[in-house]
Amino acid sequence: MNFSGPRHLGNHSSAFARYSLLVTLGFLGWGMVHRQIDYSLYLVTDRGLSRGRATLDIVGAAVRGGVTCVQLREKTCSTREFIAEALAIRECLKSRGIPLIINDRVDVALATGADGVHLGQSDMPLTMARSILGKSKIIGVSAESLRDAAEAEAEGADYLGISPIFATATKTDTAAPLGLEGLRAIRRAVKLPLIAIGGLGPNNAAEVIASGADGVAVVSAIVAAADPELAAGEMARQIAQARRT
Ligand code: TZP
Ligand code: MG
């Protein structure tokens, strides 16, 4: 009997099966480490600007409006309260596949199973945070200059918060505003996703995207809005339109 045909085919198909398995595993592995994140409308919470409303309610409304990523930023509450809030917000975001990023606190991010952490230039160094959190967690870094941006990219950040684009009353201890020109210069220099922050809202979201940002991060434009769902919806529309053009 001549088995050359079937054996020939069999060899090819088992080689193909092995190749497919490798590709699939590679793809899954890559996906686990570098899952594609939609940073386009990135909400940063602030209980002081929430007009007495619970952060969980603001997040719920903002998510209904279309935010794609949420950073829980708590500067004044206890660690216990921070953790309880993070767990509740994580539950609200989980079913929608929206990532939860914790501001500053690597321990809180780890303890609550959040998707990642956001670090400023005075927070835990990125390389230390990476060694604690591993590759599967998202680490975002605030960059206030081209040099900050290049350094964070070289050290393995997952995204950069470009800060501040414009002056803002929400955070006054910032470097000088970068403006759209500063954002464009950073866009030319690094490949990481860039999330612009500082003085942004429905009136300037489109120009920020046109200047190379992958996402627009806002505090007051959503958190302090009379109707956070409506405000998020309006910004989501502006951003979607800007990304199409
Ligand atoms: N980091 C740089 S500017 C800023 C943060 C957290 C505050 C942005 O607030 P707003 O209200 O969106 O201008
Ligand atoms: Mg910080």
Image (spheres, rainbow, N blue to C red):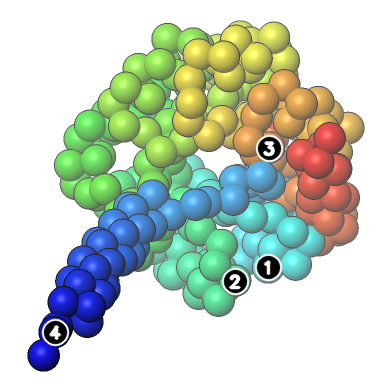
Which quarter shows the C terminus?
Answer: top right
Give the residue number, with chain letter if any, for mark 3: 216
Outermost left residue: 1
Residue under the point 66% across and 45% down: 40
> Mark 3 belongs to which amino acid?
Val
Give the residue number, with chain letter if any, for mark 1: 60
Looking at the rendered image, the disc whose residue lies closer to the viewer, 4 or 2, is 4
Circle 2: element type: loop
- Left or right, 83 with reference to 42: left
Q: Is mark 4 within 8 Å of ligand 2?
A: no
Q: Is residue 232 above or below residue 184?
A: below
- Neighbor class of circle 2 (other Cα within 10 Å; few <14, some 14-19, many 20+) is few
Q: Earlier in the sequence, mark 1 or mark 2?
A: 1
Residue under the point 73% across and 31% down: 209
Circle 3: element type: strand
Residue 144, image x, y percentages: 51, 16
Q: Earlier in the sequence, mark 4 or mark 3?
A: 4
Residue under the point 35% across and 46% down: 105
Which label number is shown at residue 2? 4
- Left or right, 232 with reference to 49: right
Q: CA distance from mark 4 to mark 1?
A: 67 Å
